[in-house]
Amino acid sequence: MSNYAAYQQSQNATQDPRHVEYRLLGQVTAALITAQQVWEKSKADVEAKKQVVDAALWNRNVWSAFRTDLLDEGNQLPKELKAQLISISLFIERETNSIMTGDADFEALIDINQQIIEGLRPKGAEEAAPVDQTAEQTAPTGSMSIDSRA
């Protein structure tokens, strides 16, 4: 199953797309934070390097699925917002390639994800807990969706 198909399948769950996107970004950002913490160790430890690569690739795949959805003609987000989000997804792809070549900049990827998570936070909702330091992190519902068809 392709990453986009998995993303589409998760959107068909009972949760609205914003909730799915918010939770997914929370999880992938937690994985990036953990990968950032083990980055130095990863140079000498195969398991740590695998964790770094897995987190970076997961994040890239999430943003690739977002980009695919943003390019779909059924996506009704404003053109300017779509263009900005597509640009972000391309930046994330370049940064992921840098991580793969050993030039890690997790901070930029984490910051972007955390800003998008904040935009997905439901209006009037309590302050959600910050992204946990574990990949099992889940996040609450949101108010901005990459997929505006819902």
Image (cartoon, grey):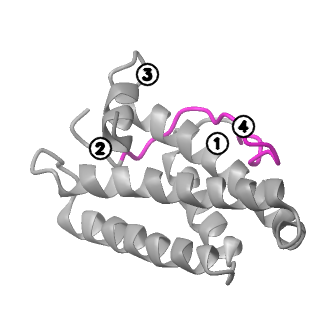
Label 2 and label 4: CA atoms lie apart by: 22 Å
Label 2 and label 3: CA atoms lie apart by: 13 Å
At x 31%, y 33%, the residue is 8
Callout 1 touching callout 4 (CB < 8 Å): yes
| SS for callout 3 | loop
Return the disc, 2 or 3, that comes first in the chain's sequence.
3
Return the disc, 2 or 4, that comes first in the chain's sequence.
4
Magenta residues (range): 127-145
| SS for callout 2 | loop
Label 1: few (<14), some (14–19) or many (≥20) C-alpha neighbours in 10 Å:
many
| SS for callout 4 | loop
The residue mark sitting in front, 4 or 3, is 4
| SS for callout 1 | helix
Residue 55: x and y, percent? 64, 54
As rendered, which of 32 and 117 lies closer to the eye? 32
Residue 137: x and y, percent? 72, 37
- Residue type at tag 2: Asp
Q: Quadrant of residue 7?
A: top left
Label 1 and label 2: CA atoms lie apart by: 19 Å
- Residue type at tag 3: Gln
Return the disc, 1 or 4, that comes first in the chain's sequence.
1
Q: Is residue 35 above or below residue 1?
A: below
Label 1 and label 4: CA atoms lie apart by: 5 Å
The residue that disc 1 covers is: 27
The residue that disc 4 covers is: 137
